[in-house]
Structure formats: C-alpha cells, structure tokens
C-alpha cells in the first residue's frame, strides 16, 4: 500500500501524540507527506468564518505540538486549522481535496451508557472516506480495566 499522503486529524486527546508519531514513521519509510489537521466545529448560530478565539488558541497549540513531535522524529509535517459545521464531513472533504492515501485517526476509550462508543465522527469517516482509514484506540484507563 502506498502511503505518500497521510491525513491525521487530531482533537486534543492523549492518543494524538501516538498517531502523529506513527504517521511520521510510516510516511518516512515511503518518503510521504503527513498533513495534520484540527477541525473547529462552528455552531450554526455563528457565521462559518467566525473566529472563536479560545478554540483557535487551543487548535494552534495542538498543531504546534504536533509539529514538535514530528521534529523530534526527524520529520516535517504540514498543519492546518479547519472550520466546519460538522467535524466528520470536514475530514472527509479534506481527504478528497488532498487526494490522500490514508486517514489515520486516534480515538479515545470513551464509554456512553456503560458501553464503548466511537462517537459520531469516527463512524462518519469510516462510512464516507474515499481511502483506507486506520484507527488507533488509546489503552483502556487503568481504573476501567477488569
């Protein structure tokens, strides 16, 4: 499988670091490019271009951290901040627009109503992505292990 263009959406979870490092490692082997994106979900009550300062500040910090992680790996990544009404469609649109070979997503171990949940974004991306999707789920928290 060719991995010359890898899209890595991050969301501020603990697993982001692992997925960025893995993407850099895989891309390096094939001399590929890694694009790390953060999507700000803009409420429908605001214009799509509205700049939500606290969100932008957090996104900039996360993207800068991803760049540092890549530099520590001896690699360089492109980063971008996206704004959209929904996160899943924004990731899929970015994958289509950039013609990526794979989307690599990190997901947390979340429970909803006592059961493990993928949330809304991951199922949307899995269903609609034009390319393979690799999920990296973080470990179960120590207090949740049986």
Image (tube, grey):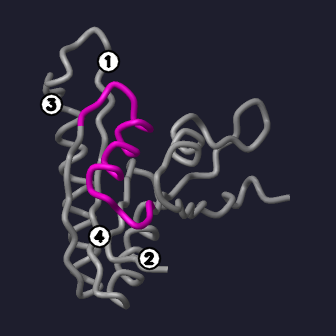
Disc 1 on helix, strand or loop? loop
Instruction: Say left or right for 6 vs 140.
Output: left
The residue range painted magenta reads: 83-103
- Residue position marked by numbered label 1 in the rendering: 43
Q: Give the image location of residue 49, x and y in percent.
A: 14, 25
Q: Which of the two residues, 13 or 99, is positioned nearer the viewer here?
A: 99
Disc 4 on helix, strand or loop? strand
Q: Are marks 1 and 2 in contact (CB under 8 Å)?
A: no
- Alpha carbon distance from label 1 to label 2: 32 Å
The residue positioned 13% from the left and 27% from the top of the image is 51
Q: Give the image location of residue 60, x and y in percent.
A: 18, 49
- Residue position marked by numbered label 4 in the rendering: 34
Q: Which mark is residue 91?
A: none
The residue positioned 23% from the left and 57% from the top of the image is 63
- Residue position marked by numbered label 3 in the rendering: 53
Instruction: Say left or right for 115 vs 44.
Output: right
Disc 3 on helix, strand or loop? helix
The residue positioned 37% from the left and 53% from the top of the image is 9
């Amino acid at each position: 499988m060719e991995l010359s263009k890898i899209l890595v959406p991050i969301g501020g979870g603990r697993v982001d670091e692992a997925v960025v490092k893995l993407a850099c490692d895989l891309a390096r082997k094939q001399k590929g490019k890694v694009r790390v994106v953060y999507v700000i979900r803009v409420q429908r009550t605001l214009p799509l271009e509205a700049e939500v300062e606290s969100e932008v500040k957090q996104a900039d910090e996360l993207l800068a951290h991803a760049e540092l992680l890549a530099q520590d790996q001896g690699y360089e990544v492109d980063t971008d901040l996206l704004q959209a009404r929904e996160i899943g469609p924004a990731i899929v649109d970015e994958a289509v627009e950039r013609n990526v070979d794979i989307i690599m997503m990190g997901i947390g171990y979340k429970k909803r109503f006592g059961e493990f949940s993928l949330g809304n974004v991951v199922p949307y991306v899995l269903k609609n992505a034009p390319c393979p999707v690799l999920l990296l789920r973080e470990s179960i928290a120590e207090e949740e292990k049986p």
